[in-house]
Amino acid sequence: MTGPAELPLWAALLTAALVVGGAGLTLIGSIGLLRLGTFYERVHAPTLGTTFGTGGVLLASMLYFSVTQSRPILHEILIAVFVTMTTPVTLMLLARAALYRDRTEGNDQVPARDRPADAPDLPSV
Amino acid sequence: MSAVILTWSIVGAQIFLTLAMGCAVYRLLYGPRAQDRVLGLDTFYVNAMLLLLTFGIRSGTMVYFEAALVIAVLGFVGTVALAKFLMRGEIIE
């Protein structure tokens, strides 16, 4: 195993670009969480961090450890697969819960549960 | 040269991720309704996981990777439990 001083320049530049890019995209997503207006807009913003942010930092980690230890280090794929599979599930559940709460309170900003009488028919399957 | 590039880029990334965690903490503390707070907690978990991974690259050890994996798993379970609680008022029915 070698330290960061013996890392080739291309690997250092690529790792630096990936880690800064991933962290920057995560920051943009979190700023969106801070600044967007309603909950249903805000729920989209952090997914920038869970997709491209996580992907960038995990790729940088894989590249760095693979080059310094001279063998493929791929166990970061575990985190990537796990985050990719769980984020849609959690955010769907959270958005459904928020919709349920808004409808229960009679908030007229969300679509109603009942279809209006003059709505077109649903397509038959 | 490689060490300088790597060190400064990781320090920059850690500053970015810390600011992102600050945004999530604001949503967690002030965020007008309960679902905003849960969303802030979820974002906070993901940002903390990424910050631990950058610490791992900086120190060159694999220990931080395992901590990040545990944080990812616990963040999923915690957010699902909180969303279920918001929807039904109890978690295990």
Image: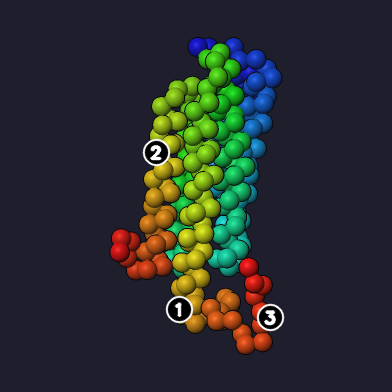
Question: Do residues under tags 3 and 1 come within 8 Å of each other at their CB atoms?
Answer: no
Q: Could one spot residue A77 in this view of the protein?
A: yes
Residue at 51 percent of width and 31 percent of height: A76
Residue under circle 2? B70
Q: Could one spot residue B18 in this view of the protein?
A: no
Pinpoint residue B25: horizontal percent, then vertical percent.
47, 53
Pinpoint residue B39: horizontal percent, then vertical percent.
49, 57
Q: Crowdedness of circle 1 by 10 Å Cα count: few (<14), some, many (20+)?
A: few
Quadrant location of the C terminus of chain A in the rendered image: bottom right
Secondary element at image label 1: helix
Residue under circle 3? A120
Q: Residue furthest bottom?
A: A117
Q: Quadrant of residue A21?
A: top right
Residue under circle 1? A104
Q: Residue furthest left?
A: B93
Secondary element at image label 3: loop
Q: Nearer the viewer, mark 2 or mark 3?
A: 3
Q: Which mark is residue B25?
A: none
Residue at 61 percent of width and 36 percent of height: A56
Task: Estimate the spatial distance between the alpha carbons at disc 2 and disc 3, rounded to whole Å.
Answer: 48 Å
The amino acid on which the numbered mark 1 sits, given as a three-letter code, is: Thr
Q: Nearer the viewer, mark 3 or mark 1?
A: 3
Q: Residue furthest front?
A: A125
Task: Estimate the spatial distance between the alpha carbons at disc 3 and disc 1, rounded to whole Å.
Answer: 25 Å
The amino acid on which the numbered mark 2 sits, given as a three-letter code, is: Val
Secondary element at image label 2: helix
Q: Is residue B3 above or below residue B44?
A: above
Towards the viewer: A92 or B17 = A92
